[in-house]
Amino acid sequence: MTPRKDLLDIASLTDEEIEFVLANAGPFKDLFKRSVKKVPTLKGQSMLTLFYEPSTRTRSSFEVAASRLSADVIHFDIESSSVVKGESVLDTVETLESMRVDYIVVRHKQSGIPSLIARNTRASVINAGDGWHAHPTQALLDAFTLREKFKDLRGARAVIVGDIQHSRVARSTSLIFRRLGMNVAYLAPGSMMPRETPDEIVCFGSWDDALAWRPDVVYLLRVQSERMDEPFFPSASEYHKIYGLTDARVDILGERGLWLMHPGPVNRGVEITDKGMNYERSLINQQVENGIAVRMSVLYWLKPGAGLES
Amino acid sequence: MPDPAPIQRLLLDSAGVNRCLDEIAGAIMKRWPEEEKLALVGIYNRGVPFAESLAARLVAAGRWVETGRIDITQYRDDLQSFTVLPRLEGSDIGFDLDDMVVILCDEVVYTARTSRAALEELLDFGRPRCVQIAALVDRAGRELPFQAEFAGIRVDLPKQERVNVRFTATDGRDEVFVTSWENKPA
């Protein structure tokens, strides 16, 4: 497989590239069982995390992945940097370019910023979430996690529940699921349902309808607390009652043997309950572990400067 | 101008390959008495069928051995220069390496850069008592200080030539032949 410089979204990947990343994640995961959980693949290379939005899980997942590939890891601290003094993104990138980092992992509240950075640096840029646009490594780790359970994902059904409209996870994950031959449905309040969805995605307004569709997987999205202030739904408890995975719904999932996923972090009592967190077919912890393996696979595949004139 | 005629010269036919395998298996048994815990670890790609062929001979002779496989891609010293990345096979050492005698099996040992990578990876799995190298073909031209204790044949060939090994398990036949690098078979 030819290396690529950046990973910005799922849409721009070929089927072969998706397959390459998913297939290699398996051997990377096997590393975790060794006494030395580290390989020298990226020895002498450096990865910088540039997070304009707070994140603990994704950032540490990338940092662990890079460490296990022997890369040096640098965290660019936005809070204490000149960004808070008004430095533009491109000025920051110019600074990073002078530091000659090899990989830049970017999260930004504005869609398109990782792509803008990628066009202005020789380093490989990985989008770790930009606005409502994309979160490609989350999608890849979700697909990898499900492939551990289903030999062939073709025909499997996943219902994604929550604030679809404002979710980059929903966008990227539903896309990769469909690319791998799965059927995808959305379950959301009208205010959180995208105005336009691809024809092959089924939209539901209630759990009863969604469960009647006979999904194999229920994928809960995090209800973002910042949305609570906006008039998307009346209250957290109201949301829980109508759209959350209540204890009663956990029982239904159990009876039907459905898999449960969530990108984390969860809001207990809103989209999920304690009982849901302890559900025996929950893949939430596997998603976290697999995130490291998949990100290692992405770092292995990307190559700084690939495709640029030397 | 037409391409020069491809070089293709047989070094070992099927009988020759099997004779070498018998000799190497015999030498390993002679060198390592029964009380030693022995493991044969094949280096992808064709070191794997090579190790398995040797192990089958040892087991048939009543000598128990562990077998494993190692994918050195992550340990290569030239990975950053690759324009096409290989799909990873993954390494599989399903036993405790500590205090074992490990024989790294590679179908051809030439510059020994593969041997270096394999040794480095192997040591990340544990602390073997001793590591040795077995090669079906030991080719002159070391760039690193490694030696193949067990070898089927030892050859010295011009740089532009490439040694190709085929095994029944992976290729449908046993043979060793020489081609030019330009005409290397798939």
Image (cartoon, coloured by chain):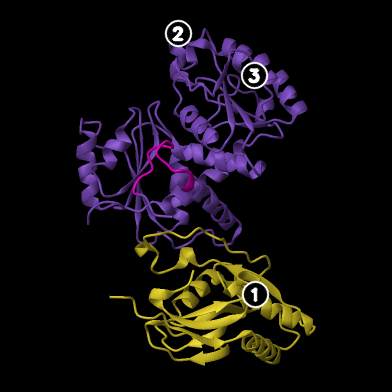
Chain colours: A purple, B yellow
Q: Examine the rendered structure and indicate whether residue A5 appears above or below residue B186.
A: above
How many neighbours does mark 2 have within 10 angstroms: few (below 14), some (14-19), or many (20 or more)? Answer: few
Residue under label 1: B168
The Cα–Cα distance between marks 1 and 3, rounded to whole angstroms, is: 53 Å
Percent x, y for residue A53? 37, 31
Residue type for callout 1: Thr
Residue in front for this viewpoint, A54 or B116? B116
- Please state if B115 lies on the left or on the right of B97 as rendered: left
Residue in front for this viewpoint, A288 or A183? A183
- The chain that hosts pointer 2 is A
Q: Examine the rendered structure and indicate whether residue A151 appears above or below residue B147.
A: above
Percent x, y for residue B29? 71, 88
Residue type for callout 3: Ala
Closer to viewer: mark 1 or mark 3: 1
User: Same chain for marks 2 and 1?
Assistant: no
Disc on the earlier residue, 3 or 2: 3
Residue in front for this viewpoint, B160 or B96? B160
- The chain that hosts pointer 1 is B
Who's the residue at 63% across and 84% down the image? Answer: B14
Magenta stretch, residue numbers: A5-16
Q: Examine the rendered structure and indicate whether residue A120 appears above or below residue B49.
A: above
The disc placed on residue A231 is: 2
User: Same chain for marks 1 and 3?
Assistant: no
Magenta segment's dominant SS is loop
The Cα–Cα distance between marks 3 and 2, rounded to whole angstroms, is: 24 Å
Who's the residue at 67% across and 65% down the image? Answer: B94
Q: Quadrant of residue B3?
A: bottom left
C-beta proximity under 8 Å, tags 1 and 3: no
Q: Quadrant of residue B23?
A: bottom right
Residue under label 3: A210
Give yes or no for residue A9 being in the magenta stretch. yes
Residue type for callout 2: Pro
